[in-house]
């Protein structure tokens, strides 16, 4: 993969430790993410990948360490505050608003961009009307981009899995995030859906310049699309570098394939 | 024919009032996925507040004007419901983010008892009259078409009109505004809603405030009909079959459900009642709800949730 021009460090994770009671989910994890790159976190099941993402997203509060975004450090952040700082995420086991249409789902992603208050919206007066329209334009572009025009009005719950994943991505993109966290975007997909999703991820990175942090346990997919990889195993970091470096790392090989004892 | 129409219209009016209470259930369920057991108590609490303030305020402020007293009392009761909504969010719901629906249901059961007890402690437990100036005299309609015309209660007519307006406004709000969309989003998935920056706390305050206001309107109308008394909180029991019939997630469903139940009750009482020995009105709604649960559990307009296995 041709190296894209990676910028400054946008997201830095320093010495994060997280424990649930006696179970250490993460111990002393540090890594950085540069602007415009596709960074992935891989590791076998239970390695702590989702916990790591949930720490960045503010769902979990790590007991130790700090995360900084564009130099601003935060230790105790709520998901909403993280969202305000420009971090969007998708979910491993789909968390879409099932009863709502594709369009409405993606429109909810524009929530933070809405400035008019409840009363203006209620009477749909001037500013509120314009705001709805301008946000709708952004959303329609995303719908085109993700090639889901035909399903605009369909309740999300009725779409096949691969398309739901796309809507999830669309909702996150509607926030116009600086950093996009993808939690196993290709889990449970067939080969064709995986290829589609890979293409969308690369396009998002190219066209919108979004920095992407991606979690995946399917090594093959990750190695093809990302710039740098962090490898976790049992809550520890065992590798960090370009796909080729990581592939050659003996610790990584043994974590994935096991070693003779 | 005239008698049939009279029964029918009477049923529609009562139905509209059921709808008003059912609407409170639907609003909170739509916007937070919680079945709010406290809705009936909120109706009672709001009506009590309104009745007492309408009585107290003129005495405190020393004026004697029915209309002004009612207006001020309405504003005061509304303020009480807003504060109640805010407290509920702060003290109860905020602690229960991402919990199972059943946990939240139990919490609303607690809120319900609190409202019942607190309301009667603060506002007293007598039966209060609530006079908001709705005309009580009946009118005769269509006197040319039918012999003797159709007897309609004017008060019911106004009540139905108010309910219809409220309903129209609320359905527009839910479907057409960004906030309405955010409300529906929160109902579907707390976590996802937070991740895209929807402020859960504020949304809940809004929903409970709106539900509180609907409860207030319902309480005022029922209260001016029957007097404000403890049995008002039992009106909610009649709203249960209405939401089952209409679907828990549908505002139009609550309305239609209310009308069907209202009309069904009255017609069955008049036309089937004599053959079965009467008293049908009391259980008719529940039997309809039961039948619906068997045949169409999501109600007339409810969302059919298909779980993939």
Image (cartoon, coloured by chain):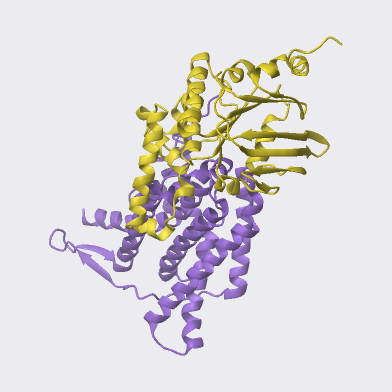
> Residue at the spot x=37%, y=48% of the render?
A132
Q: In x, y percent, where is residue B293? A: 48, 38
Residue B172 lies left or right of residue B189; in this view the side is left
Residue closest to the far bottom: B62
- Residue farthest along the right direction in this orientation: A261
Question: Where is the C terminus of chain B found, in terms of image quarters?
Answer: top right
Residue A5 falls left or right of residue B20? right
Location of residue B80 with respect to A128 vertically, above or below: below
Q: Residue at x 32, y 57 (%)?
A: A126
Residue drawn at (52%, 45%) of the image: B187
The correct choice, above or below, for A118 with respect to A29 in the image is below
**Relative to the observer, which residue lies in front, B216 or B261?**
B216
**Chain letter tied to purple:** B
Give the number of marks: 0
Using residue B122 as the reference point, say whether residue B72 is left or right of it: left
Residue at image x 31%, y 73%?
B135
Q: Which residue is farthest top?
A: A260
Q: Chain A is drawn in which colour?
A: yellow
Q: In which quarter of the image is residue A216?
A: top right
Task: Determine if residue B14 is in view.
Answer: no
In the image, residue B45 above or below residue B262: below
- Please tell me which residue lies in front, B264 or B103: B103
Image coordinates for residue A145, horizontal then vertical, percent: 40, 29
Position in image of residue B231 (x %, y %): 52, 64
Q: Can residue B219 be seen in this view?
A: yes
Q: In which quarter of the image is residue A151?
A: top left
């Amino acid at each position: 993969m041709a190296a894209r021009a990676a910028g400054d460090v946008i997201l830095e994770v320093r010495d994060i430790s997280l424990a649930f009671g006696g179970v250490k989910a993460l111990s002393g994890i540090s890594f950085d993410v540069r602007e415009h790159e596709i960074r992935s976190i891989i590791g076998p099941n239970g390695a702590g990948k989702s916990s790591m993402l949930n720490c960045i997203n503010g769902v979990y509060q790590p007991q130790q360490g700090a995360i900084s975004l564009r130099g601003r450090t935060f230790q105790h952040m709520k998901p909403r505050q993280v969202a305000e700082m420009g971090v969007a995420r998708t979910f491993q086991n789909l968390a879409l608003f099932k009863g709502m249409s594709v369009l409405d789902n993606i429109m909810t992603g524009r929530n933070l961009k809405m400035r008019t208050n409840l009363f203006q919206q209620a009477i749909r007066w001037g500013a509120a009307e314009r705001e709805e329209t301008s946000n709708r334009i952004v959303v329609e572009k995303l719908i085109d981009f993700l090639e889901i025009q035909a399903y605009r009005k369909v309740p999300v719950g009725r779409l096949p899995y691969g398309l739901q994943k796309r809507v999830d991505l669309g909702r996150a993109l509607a926030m116009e995030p600086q950093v996009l966290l993808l939690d196993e975007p290709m889990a449970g997909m067939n080969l064709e859906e995986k290829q589609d999703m890979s293409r969308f991820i690369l396009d998002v990175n190219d066209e919108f310049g979004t920095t992407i942090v991606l979690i995946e346990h399917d090594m093959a997919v990750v190695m093809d699309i990302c710039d740098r990889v962090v490898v976790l195993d049992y809550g520890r970091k065992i590798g960090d570098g370009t796909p080729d470096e990581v592939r050659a790392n003996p610790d990584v090989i043994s974590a994935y394939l096991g070693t003779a004892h | 024919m005239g008698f049939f129409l009279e029964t029918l219209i009477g049923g529609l009016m009562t139905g509209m009032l059921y709808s008003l209470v059912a609407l409170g259930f639907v609003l909170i369920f739509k916007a937070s996925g919680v079945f709010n057991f406290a809705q009936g108590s909120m109706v009672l609490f709001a009506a009590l507040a309104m009745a007492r303030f309408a009585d107290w305020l003129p005495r405190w402020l020393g004026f004697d004007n029915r209309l002004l007293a009612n207006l001020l009392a309405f504003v005061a009761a509304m303020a009480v419901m807003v504060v109640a909504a805010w407290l509920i969010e702060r003290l109860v719901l905020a602690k229960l983010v991402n919990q199972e629906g059943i946990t939240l249901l139990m919490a609303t059961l607690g809120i319900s008892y609190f409202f019942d007890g607190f309301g009667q402690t603060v506002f007293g437990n007598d039966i209060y009259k609530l006079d908001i100036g709705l005309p009580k005299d009946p009118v005769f309609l269509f006197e040319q078409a039918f012999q003797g015309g159709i007897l309609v209660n004017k008060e019911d007519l106004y009540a139905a009109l108010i309910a219809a307006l409220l309903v129209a406004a609320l359905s527009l709000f839910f479907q057409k505004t960004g906030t309405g969309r955010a409300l529906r989003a929160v109902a579907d998935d707390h976590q996802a809603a937070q991740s895209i920056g929807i402020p859960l706390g504020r949304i809940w305050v809004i929903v409970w405030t709106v539900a509180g206001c609907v409860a207030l309107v319902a309480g005022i109308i029922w209260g001016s009909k029957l007097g404000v008394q403890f049995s008002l909180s039992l009106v909610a029991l009649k709203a249960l079959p209405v939401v089952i019939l209409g679907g828990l997630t549908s505002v139009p469903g609550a309305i239609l459900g209310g009308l069907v139940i209202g009309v069904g009750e009255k017609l069955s009482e008049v036309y089937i009642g004599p053959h079965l020995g009467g008293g049908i009105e009391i259980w008719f709604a529940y039997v309809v709800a039961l039948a619906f649960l068997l045949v169409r559990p999501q109600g007339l307009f409810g969302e059919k949730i298909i779980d993939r296995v």
